[in-house]
Amino acid sequence: MKRKYFVAALTTLAIGLLSITGCIDFSSNLPPQAPSDLRVVETYATVVDLAWIDNSNNEHGFKIMRDGVEVAYEPPETNSYSDAHLSCSTTYTYCVIALRGTKEGKSNEVQTTTLGPEHNIQPIIDFTSDSQGNIQYFSAANGGGVNWPGGLPASPTIFVGDMITWTINVSNADVGLEYKFGFNPAWSGYYLLQDWSSSNTLVWTVAEYARGEYPMMQLRVRNNDQRDHFLGCDDYTFMTYVIKER
């Protein structure tokens, strides 16, 4: 009888040691802990951005559920997702499910309504201008190219130290527009002068590094539907100059 208890004790001890050393993973039979704080980060006309807290350390992945239907599968340790190609003015309900084999841990549900179609219009630049009377009527989206009429030799002359205001004019869309201004010196490089904002104007004192023939002011516009028609924007143009010292 003592031998029986002794063998049982040894067996229990062996299992304990295997568990401690990781040879047996008893957590494999446990469902993954459910994600929490599922939330809508941003809602656009055709895109919804989601984020959540990953509470599990043993999940195999995540199912993204929209209106009760799986729309995506994301790998372990993911904590965000962008759901695209949605319909405007439509309400959607989301949840995220952590998976381990056949076992699941389900998050809270969130609901959001996409923006209306007025937010889904590609903004096209009518013209850009500066406070010295120079106007650029061409842009990438309106088919006119991005050079001045007459090409680079027609670029107007401005001077280092001039304080100039640039304006981007868009008339076909007016909801949720953002504008960006950057500068390419003649010798190469790029300077961000004003990152994406709701202001369609930039006031800039022409810097010493801008001096040269045909440096470019970059002028860009986008809306908030997250469907850029060009790289990082919906329309863009350039205004080139000859910049001299006074």
Image (cartoon, rainbow, N blue to C red):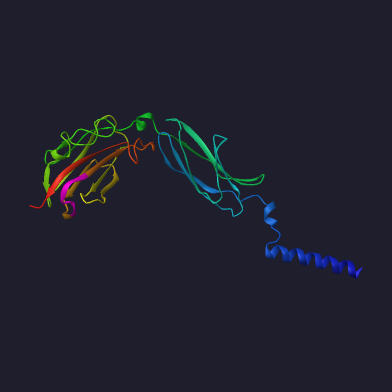
Quarter of the image for residue 71 reads top right
Residue 49 screen position, x and y as percent: 45, 42
Q: Residue at x 45, y 39 (%)?
A: 48
Quarter of the image for residue 227 reads top left
Q: Is residue 29 above or below residue 85?
A: below
Q: Is residue 145 above or below residue 22?
A: above
Q: Residue at x 29, y 38 (%)?
A: 221
Residue 184 screen position, x and y as percent: 23, 48
Q: Is residue 168 above or below residue 22?
A: above
Q: Residue at x 16, y 44 (%)?
A: 241
Residue 233 in the figure: left or right of residue 88: left
Residue 201 screen position, x and y as percent: 21, 42
Residue 29 in the figure: left or right of residue 3: left
In this rendered view, identify the residue nearer to me: 192 or 68: 192
Q: Which residues are magenta?
A: 209-216
Residue 240 screen position, x and y as percent: 18, 42
Principal secondary structure, stretch drawn in magenta = strand
